[in-house]
Structure formats: C-alpha cells, structure tokens
Image (cartoon, rainbow, N blue to C red):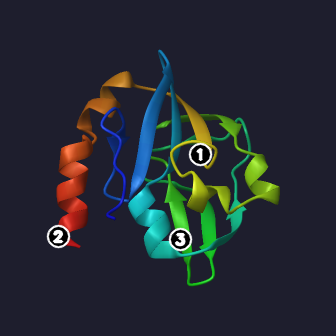
Amino acid sequence: MGPVTPEELKYTEEHEWLATKAESTVRVGITDYAQQQLGDVVYVDLPEVGKTVTAGDPVGEVESTKSVSEIFAPVAGEVTAVNSALDGQPELINSDPYGEGWIIELSVADADALEGLMDASAYQELTEKA
C-alpha cells in the first residue's frame, strides 16, 4: 500500500504536513511518505517553545536507524508547542505520523504564507516522481 496523504492538510517539498489548529496556529509533522523513507525513528530533537523561526529554518531533527533528517519551519512564526511525547516514544512518527506523531505547533506570522504550500494532489505527484 502506498503512503497515506490526507486531503485536508497542506504539504511542503521537505515532506512535512501542516494542519490548521486555530486561526493563526498550525500543527506540523512529517508525512507518511517521509517516515517510510526514514525507517524506524529512534530520536527526535525538538526546538524550544517560544523560538521565532523563518520559513526554511531548521527547527529540529528526526533520527532514524538509517539517517538523520532536519525538520524545517514550513512558514515563519513562533514555536508555541512541541510534542513532548516524542521524547519517550519517537516511534509515534512511524505509527501515527498525522496524529500522535505530530512534531511542533507554530503561531503563523503571515497566514497568506499557507497559500503557497502544496495540496494533497500536488504532494502525491511530488512523491510519485521520487
């Protein structure tokens, strides 16, 4: 079975997803495709809550048995929450990448920035080319 790509989310070329949680808050994680490519996740390095980020900034790392991948801020804003459950259970990224395996929440500086992200069909096309 291929990777799951929920229709309601936004996506980036770095294989991250965004879900709008409130008017200016988004939840960010890595996609099902990304966790399949990474393999078993063994450690997640999370940023500090309150950190201000620019789109494209590295904000953490996901370490798997195969490699280490940086997590990038998909949009500019401030880190308002991190998923501390990943400290003890990094494998949640593998088992539930769109749910319990979320990574950070951001307060978005400019809501228009979300318009430039990919929808599910555009993201699926990207992964099919890979």
Question: Is residue 84 rendered to the left or right of residue 95?
Answer: right
Amino acid type at mark 2: Lys
Closer mark to the observer between disc 3 and disc 1: 1
Q: Label 3's element?
A: strand
Q: Which mark is residue 129?
A: 2
Residue at the limit of the structure toward the top, as seen here? 23
- Name the residue located 57 percent from the left edge and 62 percent from the top edge: 94
Q: Position of residue 15 (x, y in %)?
A: 38, 58
Quadrant housing residue 93: bottom right
Image: 127 above or below 108: below
Q: Could you tell which of marks 3 and 1 lies nearer the N-terminus? A: 3
Regarding residue 109, the answer to whether it shows in the image is yes
Is residue 93 toward the left or the right of residue 34 in the image? right
- Compared with residue 111, is residue 96 higher up or lower down, i.e. above or below? below
* Mark number displayed over residue 71: none
Q: Quadrant of the C terminus?
A: bottom left
Label 2 sits on a secondary structure element that is helix
Q: Is residue 26 above or below residue 36?
A: above
- Which type of secondary structure does the marked residue at label 1 adopt? loop
Q: List the residue tagged with mark 3.
A: 69
- How far apart, in angstroms, are the residues tagged by discs 3 and 1? 15 Å
Circle 2 packing at 10 Å, graded few (<14), some (14-19), many (20+), is: few
Where does label 1 land, which residue?
Answer: 102
Q: Quadrant of residue 120?
A: top left
Q: How far from the left and from the top, in percent, is residue 18?
A: 43, 39
Disc 3 residue type (three-letter): Ser
Q: Give the amino acid at mark 1.
A: Trp
Residue visible at 19% across and 46% down in the picture: 121
Q: Image quadrant of residue 117?
A: top left
- Distance from disc 3 to disc 2, alpha carbons, whole Å, reads 20 Å
